[in-house]
Image (tube, rainbow, N blue to C red):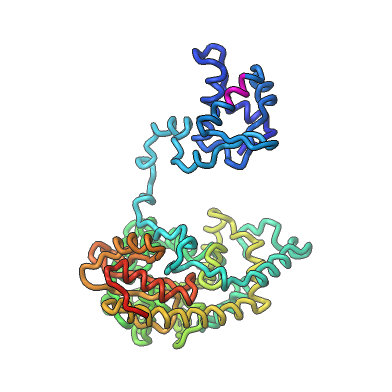
Amino acid sequence: MPTRNDAAIWSGLFRISTDSGQTLQAQIRQAIVAAILDRQIAASMPLPSCRILAEKLGVARGTVVLAFQQLVDQGFLIARERRGHFVNPEVLTSPAKPSQRQSEGDTIDWKARRQVPATELQSPSNQVNWIKYSYPFVYGQFDPALFPTAEWRECNRMALAVLEIRNWAADMVDRDDPLLIEQIQARLLPRRGIFANPDEIIVTLGAQNALYMLATLLMTKGSKVAMEDPGYPDARSIFNLAGAETLPVRVDAEGIVADEVPSDAGFVFVTPSHHCPTMVPLSARRRQQLLADAAERNQIIIEDGYDSQLLDDAPQQALKSLDRSGRVIYVGSMSKTLAPGLRIGYIVAPSELIAELRALRRFMLRHPPANNQRAVALFLSLGHHEALVRRLSAAFGERRRRLIQAVNAFLPEWRATDSAGGASVWLEGPQGMDTGALAETAAARSVVIEPGKRFFARGDRHTQFMRLGISSIALQHIEPGIRELATAAGRRPAAA
């Protein structure tokens, strides 16, 4: 955005011509209106003074004064005493019209030129403004009340010390912060029973980036990936982008039905710690069968440690910890504990594969921001993450129990999946229920829910499911939120 004193830029927005059939004042008004509607002038930025603009345009100051005054009368500008003229914020609430450059670019058919149909894949859940709602039953977001603000600030201050800056400010090319690798190796992985060498770990920009890198490196058109149904929708889309075919496999109370994994699948994608989205853990019997079948069929297993960092009532080791053949690739993330916006994840795999991933990542983004890596490493090394996990686990456990109680009381016709942990609850409603429509009705009552059909390969057949997250809603808001949801679902809540 231009500043008030960027005279050259401001004059570039105004194309005044004496050959035009319009008056100079009208041309100035048209130029300002176009710049406002094209979002080229921010509401917080004062326009240049009448004197400066008149000098740059070579017109009389009175011409600019009259143009500004008429734009104030029309509601495009507002005049603030001793500060100047500003864009009226109300004008910016209307949709922006295409700029001249965009209009010229419309002659190019970008969809015809693309090689992957990215915009036609499944859209993410619409939870952008969840924090504005009274009852945000959203998954994958953080609770500002539980975020370790003081500890995180401390680690960032430490990372900005002179000696620390020397450690992370240089281009690391394809390497990661050695302290972060050490902390992942010593603090995070042993919790899941995984013991790895430093050359078997690579840092990623979250779990999705990890899956994208694996799909780019290992999959191609014709690859087949067996995955849970319902399952992680973004993983399905990422594999499809790589040209792979995803083969849905049924899920029951023990997790993925191993007997139904197609033998011709080259890959198996699973979330065994907490299945996405039902949160049921994969049984020990199914784990052993998956590993045995993968060895026999020469399959690669991609294990997403979905919701695995929290402390569970019945914790299980990762599938990777049971692997003796090196065919399980483990993907982890700190999004559900520290913060999703931080985008810190990692892959644990044989060193040969990690070396290939490092070479690939170098061409994609070289490495995740090293200052963030160092801050997270310090956060882990000082024990802040351990304390945070204990605090989150206790809070989420209490919220989960309160949510189940409220559902049983006010939505008795809905069935919740029995789960020992995790940051969400999976619900199945009565036949004929459309949770997509319910989400719209609930939003009007300040309740945010996530319809479940996006998790299924054939979502149109499964409209009665929904996922309720507990990571972002305060304990005291859970019961009132479920009462509002019950009202939105057409059931009048009983008296408290």
Quarter holding the N terminus is top right
Q: Going 33% across and 59% down the picture, which residue do you hit?
A: 440
Q: Main secondary structure of the magenta part?
A: helix
Picture layout, residue 212 above or below residue 473? above
Front position in the image: 360 or 462: 462
Q: Going 46% across and 39% down the picture, which residue do you hit?
A: 96
Image coordinates of residue 392 in percent, x first then y, are 53, 78
Front position in the image: 337 or 167: 337
Image coordinates of residue 383 in percent, x first then y, are 65, 79
Please count the marks in the image.
Answer: 0
Residue 21 lies left or right of residue 416; in this view the side is right
Image coordinates of residue 199 in percent, x first then y, are 58, 71
Residue 5: quadrant of the picture? top right
Quarter holding the C terminus is bottom left
Picture layout, residue 229 above or below residue 386? above
Residue 274: quadrant of the picture? bottom left
Work out whether residue 299 can be spotted: no
Residue 97 lies left or right of residue 352; in this view the side is left
Q: Residue furthest right?
A: 162
Residue 359: quadrant of the picture? bottom right
Work out whether residue 106 can be spotted: yes
Front position in the image: 289 or 275: 275
Image coordinates of residue 90 in percent, x first then y, are 50, 41
Picture layout, residue 279 above or below residue 12? below
The residue stretch that appears in magenta: 63-68
Q: Is residue 66 magenta?
A: yes
Q: Going 69% across and 24% down the picture, which residue do you hit?
A: 51
Q: Is residue 123 magenta?
A: no
Residue 215 lies left or right of residue 453; in this view the side is right
Residue 103 lies left or right of residue 394; in this view the side is left
